[in-house]
Image (cartoon, rainbow, N blue to C red):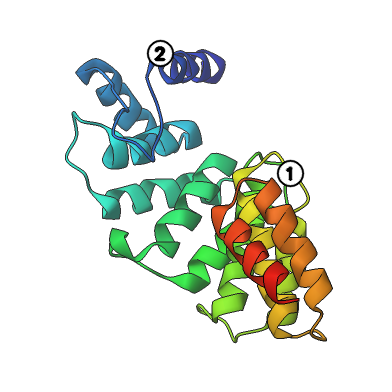
């Protein structure tokens, strides 16, 4: 029975147009009713999908509190997409439930996995240490996480991480100031498509 249920949820997932960052998550009333039923029975995939409807479905009133509730239930069960979602929801103040410590907790879960969003989580952990968001500001730790996030040049967060590594070396934040290394990181950031990295590279290149 559980196998059949999982297949049904998977079929629903594949049939819908889904992106919790965009308002394009469509689901029929019958599908929504089934997902709610399974979510209430503790199915992690259903809980994740239900959380997504409260963020992105044009057929359901946006409710970030409900999104947090259901994504966290799924995240606790080890659902990696849900962990990435709840980490984002707790990080962003515009969702009204900002909690950096909880965000860091879930981002670490994702970062320490092989999930496709692991590099994004590494970047956000680095940002929390860089700006002192929910933790004591620690440039050495932020550098560690930015270096990890910068490893994959094909991901968008790579350019941001490289740009911030440039800032760390340019201003000597937790490391010995090194303008050459800063310029190299800004150049890599620019190559990765980060415009701020390009701008900073031009400035530092003209002065040093």
**Which quadrant of the figure has residue 172?**
bottom right
Q: What x and y, as percent, mark residue 119?
A: 67, 50
Mark 2: give few (<14), some (14-19) or many (20+) Cα within 10 Å. few
Q: Is residue 79 visible?
A: no
Viewer-nearest of discs 2 and 1: 1
Above or below, 179 relative to 188: below
Q: Is residue 73 visible?
A: yes
Dot 1: what SS? loop
Above or below, 161 relative to 151: below
Q: Which numbered disc covers residue 79?
A: none
- Please state if 144 lies on the left or on the right of 118 as rendered: right
Quadrant location of the C terminus? Answer: bottom right
Q: Nearer the viewer, residue 208 or 159?
A: 208
Dot 2: what SS? helix
Q: What x and y, as percent, mark residue 129?
A: 61, 76
- Please state if 128 lies on the left or on the right of 53 as rendered: right
Q: Which numbered disc covers residue 153?
A: 1
Callout 2 touching callout 1 (CB < 8 Å): no
Q: Which residue is mark 2?
A: 15
At 40% across and 13% down in the image, what residue appears?
15
Q: Nearer the viewer, residue 69 or 94?
A: 94
């Amino acid at each position: 029975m559980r196998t059949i249920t999982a297949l049904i949820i998977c079929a629903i997932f594949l049939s819908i147009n889904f992106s919790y960052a965009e308002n394009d998550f469509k689901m029929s009333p019958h599908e929504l009713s089934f997902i709610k039923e399974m979510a209430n029975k503790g199915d992690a995939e259903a809980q994740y999908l239900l959380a997504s409807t409260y963020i992105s479905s044009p057929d359901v009133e946006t409710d970030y509190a409900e999104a947090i509730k259901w994504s966290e239930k799924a995240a606790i069960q080890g659902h990696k997409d849900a962990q990435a979602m709840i980490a984002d929801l707790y990080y962003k103040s515009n969702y009204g439930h900002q909690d950096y410590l909880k965000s860091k907790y879930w981002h670490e879960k994702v970062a320490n996995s092989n999930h496709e969003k692991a590099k994004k989580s590494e970047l956000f952990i680095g940002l929390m240490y860089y700006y002192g968001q929910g933790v004591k500001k620690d440039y050495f730790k932020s550098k560690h996480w930015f270096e990890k996030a910068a490893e994959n040049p094909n991901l968008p967060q790579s350019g941001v991480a490289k740009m911030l590594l440039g800032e760390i070396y340019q201003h000597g934040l937790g490391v010995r100031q090194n303008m050459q290394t800063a310029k190299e990181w800004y150049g890599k950031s620019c190559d990765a498509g980060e415009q701020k990295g390009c701008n900073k590279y031009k400035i530092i290149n003209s002065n040093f």
